[in-house]
Image: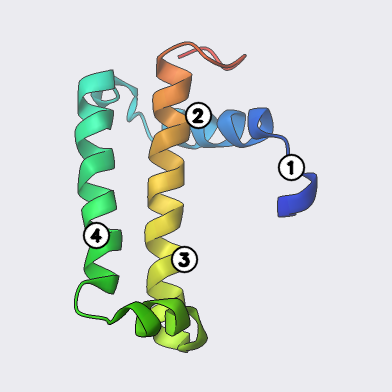
Amino acid sequence: MADDATPVAALKEAIHAFSKVRRWEPYHSPKNLAMALASEVGELCEVFRWLTEDESRQAANDPALRVAIADELADVANIVLLLSVHLGSTSATP
C-alpha cells in the first residue's frame, strides 16, 4: 500500500486481519496493547539513545539505522492501530 493513497481505515483493517489470523485477539486488551505500545516506543528511543541532536537528524541516512527506525516505527504504528480497533474507533470489529 502506498503511503499517500492508503486510508487509515484500510491500515486498521489489515492489521486487525493479520492479528486475527494469528489468533492474537485474546491478548489484545486495551491494557496489554498500551503496555506493548510503551515497550515499542522504548525500543524506538533506544535507536536514538546516545546520538547527539545532529546525529539523530541524520540517522535515517545510515542504512542500518534506517532499517532499525523503520522496524520500530512499524511496530509502534501497528499497535496504535490495533489499540484503536479494540477501543472501537474503526469499522473493523474485534
* Residue under pointer 3: 70
The residues tagged by marks 2 and 4 sit, at their Cα atoms, a distance apart of 22 Å
The image's mark for residue 16 is 2
- Label 1–label 3 contact, CB within 8 A: no
Q: Position of residue 87 (x, y in %)?
A: 41, 14
Determine the image quadrant of residue 11: top right
Could you say which is closer to the camera, residue 14 or residue 32? 32
Q: Earlier in the sequence, mark 4 or mark 3?
A: 4
The residues tagged by marks 2 and 3 sit, at their Cα atoms, a distance apart of 20 Å
* SS under mark 1: loop
Q: Residues within 10 Å of mark 4 (few under 14, many from 20)?
A: some
Q: Earlier in the sequence, mark 1 or mark 4?
A: 1
**Which residue occupies 52% across, 12% down?**
93
Amino acid type shown at disc 3: Ala
Determine the image quadrant of residue 42: bottom left
Q: Earlier in the sequence, mark 2 or mark 1?
A: 1
* SS under mark 2: helix
* Residue under pointer 1: 6
The residues tagged by marks 1 and 3 sit, at their Cα atoms, a distance apart of 18 Å
Amino acid type shown at disc 1: Thr
